[in-house]
């Protein structure tokens, strides 16, 4: 079965600082990868998804970007964080059929 | 694109009662319907899913039913226990291939 790693687990960053969150997947090859954000007490907002190395689709216009430098590595970045970027960031993985998404443990980001 | 509505937003039951959460979807091409459970501060976990070629699927105390004609599907939890307390999300995967999630139902099981 696959395992999804995310780090860091928690992060406190000042407004205007850069961001880099990393996600790696074990136990599968050629997965579809996703970044979601969840505000406190809210639903899951899809930010980006990727069907292969270097292939990124953006779902929501914002100051975030994503990259997939390797098959099982997915990175979420920002050059300048906003207060509204605070939230619980979840990486997810699925097979190429887009079914059965499995989520990583998440990174809780607080922008101060 | 796909639109998923989930009801109720909050559900409070007594231990041992049944709980039902309902979702409707808009894309008639949707053919995969997962349910996720998210405990406080944790990641969502896939608990059951159903594909469009079946009408019902059961796993111990959890069952999911699908009505493709009416475009709705439901999660049924029987003999609820306090550890069932969590937020439950439905999702539908349609023609765009990316699953669309409902807004979640907070289930509270009182001992």
Image (cartoon, rainbow, N blue to C red):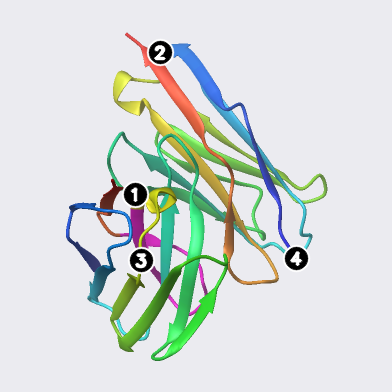
Q: Tell me the tag on residue A73.
A: none
Tag 1 subunit = A
Q: Horizontal and vertical percent for residue B6?
A: 63, 37
Residue wearing tag 1: A88
Q: Residue at x 67, y 71 (%)?
A: B96
Q: Residue at x 61, y 71 (%)?
A: B97
Tell me how far mark 4 sits from mark 3, CA to CA: 39 Å
Question: Nearer the viewer's eye, disc 4 or disc 2?
Answer: 4
> Does the residue at mark 4 contact the one at mark 2 (Cβ under 8 Å)?
no
Residue wearing tag 4: B29
Q: Horizontal and vertical percent for residue B14?
A: 43, 9
- In the rendered image, residue A91 lying in the magenta stretch gets the answer yes
Res. B29 image quadrant = bottom right
Helix, strand, or loop for circle 2? Answer: loop
Decide which of B41, B94 is in the foreground and name it: B41
Tell me how far mark 2 sits from mark 1, CA to CA: 32 Å
Question: Nearer the viewer's eye, disc 3 or disc 2?
Answer: 3
């Amino acid at each position: 079965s696959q395992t999804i790693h995310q780090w860091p687990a928690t992060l406190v960053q000042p407004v205007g600082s850069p961001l880099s969150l990393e996600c790696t997947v074990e136990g599968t090859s050629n997965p579809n990868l996703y970044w979601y954000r969840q505000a406190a007490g809210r639903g899951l907002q899809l930010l980006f998804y990727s069907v292969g190395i270097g292939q990124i689709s953006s779902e929501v216009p914002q100051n975030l970007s994503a990259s997939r430098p390797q098959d099982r590595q997915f990175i979420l970045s920002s050059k300048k964080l906003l207060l509204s970027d605070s939230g619980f960031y979840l990486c997810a993985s699925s097979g190429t059929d887009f079914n059965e998404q499995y989520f990583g443990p998440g990174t809780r980001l607080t922008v101060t | 694109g796909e639109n998923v509505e989930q009801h109720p937003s909050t559900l409070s039951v007594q231990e041992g009662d049944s709980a039902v959460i309902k979702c409707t979807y808009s894309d008639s091409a949707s053919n995969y319907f997962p349910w996720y459970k998210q405990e406080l501060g944790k990641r969502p976990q896939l608990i059951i899913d159903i594909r469009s070629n079946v009408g019902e699927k059961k796993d111990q105390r959890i069952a999911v039913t699908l009505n493709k004609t009416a475009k709705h599907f439901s999660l049924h939890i029987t003999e609820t226990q306090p550890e069932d307390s969590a937020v439950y999300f439905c999702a539908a995967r349609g023609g765009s291939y990316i699953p669309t999630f409902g807004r979640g139902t907070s289930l509270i099981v009182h001992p």
